[in-house]
Image (cartoon, coloured by chain):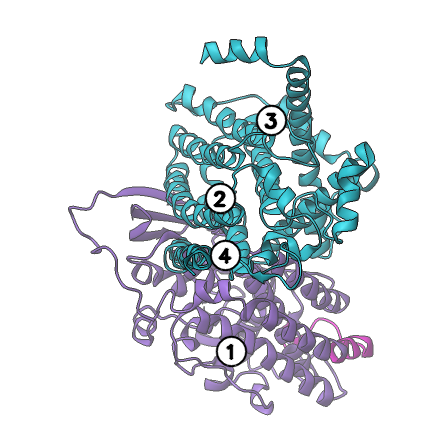
Amino acid sequence: MIESIFKFFTTEPYWTLTRSILYLVGICIFVAANAAYLVWVERKGAGRFQRRPGPTESGPWGLLQPPADGIKLLAKQLMAPPGSDKILFWAAPLMVIAPPLVCLAAIPFGNNVLARDLNIGLLMVFSFGSINVMALMLGGWASRNKYAIISAARVVSQNVAYEIPMLLVVITIIMVTGTMNLQEIIVQQAGGFWNWNILRGIWDFSGGGWGHIGGNLLAPVTFLIFYICMLAETNRAPFDMAEAESELVAGAFTEYGGMGFGVFFMAEYANIVVGCALATILFLGGWQSGLGSGFGTLLTSWGVIGTVIGVGFFFAKMYFLIFSVVWIRWTFPRTQFYGLLNLSWKILIPISLFTLLLTSVLLKLPRLF
Amino acid sequence: MNIPQLIPVGDPSAETFTINLGPQHPATHGVLRVKLEMDGEFIVNAQPVPGYIHRMHEKMGENRTYAQYLPNTSRIDYLSAMTYTHAFVGAVEKAAKIEVPLRAEYIRVITSELNRISSHLVGWGAWIMDLGGFTPILYAFDDREKILDLLEAITGSRLTYCYYRFGGVCDDVDQTFIDGCKAFVPYMRERMKMYKKLVTGNIIFRKRVEGIGPISAEMCRKYGACGPVLRGSGVNYDVRKAEPYSIYNQFDFDIPVYQECDSLARYLVRMDEIEQSLRIIEQACAKIPEGPFQGKVPRILKLPVGDTCFATECGRGRLLVRITSDGKEEAYRIRLRTPCFTNLSLFEEASQGMMLADAISLMASLDLVIPDIDR
């Protein structure tokens, strides 16, 4: 491994190295800003849903609320409960915030706006994305608190249950697109919105003319499955089993105070950003405008301006999805734990297996004749 | 109605652990403590430990005059203060044979029913909050605010009303209040339609309450459960119909009864009761007569020697006040039979073998007010 790192620093072109470092710093800032201001969006949004103004006191429209919260959390004493495993207890917050940072490195926000253009970007995002569970489990386990342990056990079975349909759905996408490179998946979805994977699966116009039947007839359903699994994987309502505050007080985070809790909180939003970005890339065309091929070539040919417009489209889609996550949280009650597992094992997994089968048959059929 | 029992309850080979739900826990809405014997997520045994907010309300009745004790009664179940004062005032009036003018009875019915609606709204919102939905409670409080504004205008307080007096009410109501009540009825009916769409029809909510926490009529009889819990188990018992007090027999209203015995049945009973209360308010506002609001009461109130019982239907069930008098200015003994205590007592049996989250749903469906348990 050391050799490969050494090789990276010596043989890679100067620009790639600088770009990587720049992007990594940028991603850290992006995650921090998102975590802080998504909390603000969530609180303002919740306020609107609940017929109240939300935060108003600090700054205009309460915009200084996140820094104020951050300062408060930083100023608090860090305490681990007596008898807890100190190392695991403090390792958990680090483990929970690191994976989404790594995941964002592979996510293209615009035309070539990404830290590392990986052939297996999708695989990397998923392999790092699932570390998050272990962090929650460790945090709950090390806390030496019964509520936290119950929560830890819940998190593990929940995430195992939801990782399966999510990956099955993603495999159908890989089969249709034929690549795990996120950048390439987006390029394939160029043109009108009917070329996005969510619709292209039904009827594929990309060949020109009247087009032909797509690879995945149930593409909108797979998007829905992906979205539900994304909610469950990020432990958001209505699947917030890890932090079921009316049952488990604060679940795995019960014993965390100050910035220990703050990091878990930030990681939750960072994970939502990763999940929604991935949903945008895989199903909603990433930074493609969806306004037809004329506008699409404009994004790639206009240099910096075109790229910026593309990033704008990406963010518009991603933040719409994030807003819908907030919307769902403040509308629905929490599901029951066995209901959650039933939903995954009895409904989502069979459907996603079926779509996988259907996709493989549809892809093979033309070659048979 | 039948949840398959996934583990044998009380199996000695099962490795269990104890967890303290409360006295400081978000789902107990106060200082109720439940000792849970758990096997993983399943409850083997749940033992409620009341007594953390015991304030000796019954004992206080023995060393103060009846008029001095009156404010105490509104602090027992703080969400249905009107009906609690009504029970005590009714018991004293019954013993001392005090006549209550008709207008005062109408005012009592209107305010009691408004209080019942506000109590059910809090119970409703808090229930959804226990299930993880935050928004409905704020909608409920928005409606409750309207009721509190109406009641504040005539009683001067917003929660622990001490509005009823022996022989009538403290102060007359004005036309603004009557008009406000008349305007509130159609407003609330519109809101109920929205709540049915938003919450009652919600699939996640249905899954959380349908078939959860079965409480049979037999179990209700065994523990003396009352109120919406009893009516959700298919027993048609409401004090307002069974032993009508005040002028409840002059109004046209139904007692909602559901046979399903689950949490959803108790939920629907409460929702229907809000609508029936609106019907009563509508009729009472239309018929309220002119006249005095306070009857004749002796300056020094002494009850004749003996026992007097008076029951009212409050938001959570049947409240019975029993005054034992030895002819002095103070009572010899005041006994309060409160609904939450009996409703809580069946929790131990009803929650056996349930999952933790379902037990929380069951406890929320009992709509407990903790000071009412401990008194």
Density class for disc 2 (Cα within 10 Å; few <14, some 14-19, many ≥20) is many
Q: Which residue is mark 4?
A: B131
The kind of residue on which mark 3 rests is: Arg
Kindly state the secondary structure of the residue where label 1 is placed.
Answer: helix
Q: Nearer the viewer, mark 2 or mark 3?
A: 3
Do the residues at pointers 1 and 2 share their chain? no
- Dot 2 and dot 4 residues touching (CB under 8 Å): no
Q: Which chain is purple?
A: B
Q: Which chain is cyan?
A: A
Dot 3 falls on which chain? A
Q: Nearer the viewer, mark 1 or mark 4?
A: 4
The answer to whether residue B213 is seen in the rendering is yes
Q: Which residue is mark 3?
A: A116
Kindly state the secondary structure of the residue where label 3 is placed.
Answer: loop
Q: Is residue B189 above or below residue B338?
A: below
Q: CA distance from mark 1 to mark 3?
A: 87 Å
Nearest to the observer: residue A345 or residue B289: A345
Q: Nearer the viewer, mark 4 or mark 3?
A: 3
Kindly state the secondary structure of the residue where label 2 is placed.
Answer: helix
The image quarter in which residue B284 lies:
bottom right
Do the residues at pointers 2 and 3 share their chain? yes
Mark 1 or mark 4, which has the lower sequence index? 1
Numbered tag placed on residue B95 in the rendering: 1
Q: Residue furthest front?
A: A369
Which range of residues does the magenta coloring cover?
B165-182
Do the residues at pointers 1 and 3 share their chain? no
The kind of residue on which mark 1 rests is: Ala
- Dot 1 and dot 3 residues touching (CB under 8 Å): no
Q: CA distance from mark 2 to mark 4?
A: 20 Å
Dot 4 falls on which chain? B
Density class for disc 1 (Cα within 10 Å; few <14, some 14-19, many ≥20) is many
Identify which residue is drawn at 59% across, 90% down: B252
